[in-house]
Image: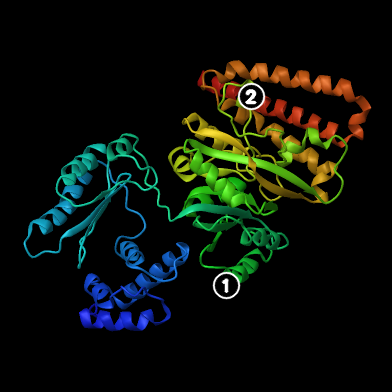
Amino acid sequence: MGVDAPDLKGRLSILDVRDRNKKLATDISLEAIARRTRGFTGADLANLLNEAAILTARRRKEAITMMEIDDAVDRVVAGMEGTPLIDGKSKRLIYHEVGHAIVGTLLKDHDPVQVVWLLAVKLRIKTGPGPIWAKMMGTLSACETVSRNLRAGFPEIWLDPLTKKSPRTIFEKKQTYVMVDFNFTVAIRAYNAEQRLESLLEKLSSQTNTENISWEIVIVDNNSTDNTAKILQEYQSNWPESCPIKYYLEPRQGASYARQRAMEEARGSLVGFLDDDNLPSPDWVAKAYSFGVAHPKAGAYSGLVHAIYEVEPPQNFKRIASCLAIIEWSAKEPFCFNSQDPLKRGLLPPGAGLVIRKEAWVENVTANLKLKGPVKGSLTVKGEDLEALWYLRKAGWEIWFNPEMHIYHQIPQSRLEKEYLMRLLRGVGLSRHFTRMLGYQPWQRPLVIPLYMANDLRKAIRHSLKYGKELETDIVASSEMEMYWGSLESHLRALGEFLKWKKAEK
């Protein structure tokens, strides 16, 4: 048996019940809300007030105002995102849907159109009580024509709140629409992290200077086998609503899968990545966010990564510390890796503490990165961070280093032992072919592979002559040798595949 949506009196009664645990501003009229929500069910009305309460907490207001009610209605009626369309049929659909609003505006007794939003290539039209919505995405020729015709006849036009650009600029770039609700997202990849998460979350709960920053925490459980999920659920139940914690399970093992999932779920315009063994400084969120605001062309940036060693590291460990994402450069001022300085141009920051602009990632980073990162105990596909950053730099985004951002990487004794370090650096070496070839055209690669092989062989021979028998006892030197051999092997494999392909072609 079907049940019709409640009438005005029913909606008013439902709102009267649902608002009892909500603090409303004195100027809010439940009757006005009831009149605006024709067609809403009881669940829709409850959802509306809940969304308004969440937005109020995020904006650090004491009571729900009409601004939160308006935004909550947007979400309940229009949802979070539109469906991508293409020209042709989409052009007719856009004109059709916009026509509803235009005709309604011209009719004498129809509710007036209040706002037209142009968010990237997403067009959304809002009227007064009993709203009519047109929500779609399209290409330049369709959307730009519609927006040009609408600007003359509608009372308000709002541009993309992130880019502040004109519709023309946005359409020409064919920018992907990105839904954001927060200024900043802290994204954490967790794998069997029940012993480490408490310390990390305590550091995040005590962040300073975030009063004017709306931010969230997204935790991606990369298929843990311990009690990681249970611990997170306990924290979620007691965590303040002003900075929500969201939990997602990513069953595909690998750091790149977890990072991709985090970017999909993040609702911040900037996404800062922390591993579960990282501890941010008390002002990390504030420093990371302010740097992103001050450098709008920065697609990604990172800071200093200090080590907290469980035991004393091996002698000369600084030579390979960067392979464990330890970055303690002496630079006192920010610098751009895109600079013409060859010493800086050849560098890229590690993934720990890396902040990525979501717009840059969505537009340019492929969903299927070849290098998957650490998978359980395997370290043979390292370099996933470099692969993603290369796509950003190739697209023209700047990559920066900000010395005011500090995180602390906890290094257990097991990661300082010879067996682990040799496997780690061999994995770094095995990723060298792929990361080196990213900057070359396919036809250039067979020409440069022998040059890289010769250089790796030269380094291995020189290293062997320099350390000799010490390679058996010197943990750092033997690990470096593994990296040289792994790099040489990666190019040999690639060259073999190329020759096999040429043979099959004949």
In the rendered image, residue 235, in percent from the top left (x then y), is placed at 61, 68
Provide the secondary structure element on which disc 1 rests.
Answer: helix
Q: Nearer the viewer, residue 64 or 416?
A: 64
Residue 411 as seen in the image, left or right of residue 287: right
Q: Hey, what amino acid is under mark 2? A: Gly
Position of residue 61 relative to residue 258, above or below, is: below
In the rendered image, residue 186, in percent from the top left (x then y), is placed at 56, 53
* Residue at (20, 64) in percent of width and height: 128
Q: Hey, what amino acid is under mark 1? A: Ser
Provide the secondary structure element on which disc 2 rests.
Answer: helix
* Residue at (67, 51) in percent of width and height: 281
* Residue at (52, 42) in percent of width and height: 292
Position of residue 476 relative to residue 268, above or below, is: above
Task: Give the crowd class for mark 1: few <14, some 14-19, many >=20 residues within 10 Å.
Answer: few
* Between marks 1 and 2 in the image, the one whose residue lies nearer the viewer: 1
Give the spatial CA distance, label 1 vs label 2: 55 Å
The answer to whether residue 392 of the structure is visible from this angle is yes
Mark number, residue 496: 2
In the rendered image, residue 29, in percent from the top left (x then y), is placed at 28, 75
The residue indicated by pointer 1 is 237
Residue 140 as seen in the image, left or right of residue 184: left
Position of residue 336 relative to residue 29, above or below, is: above
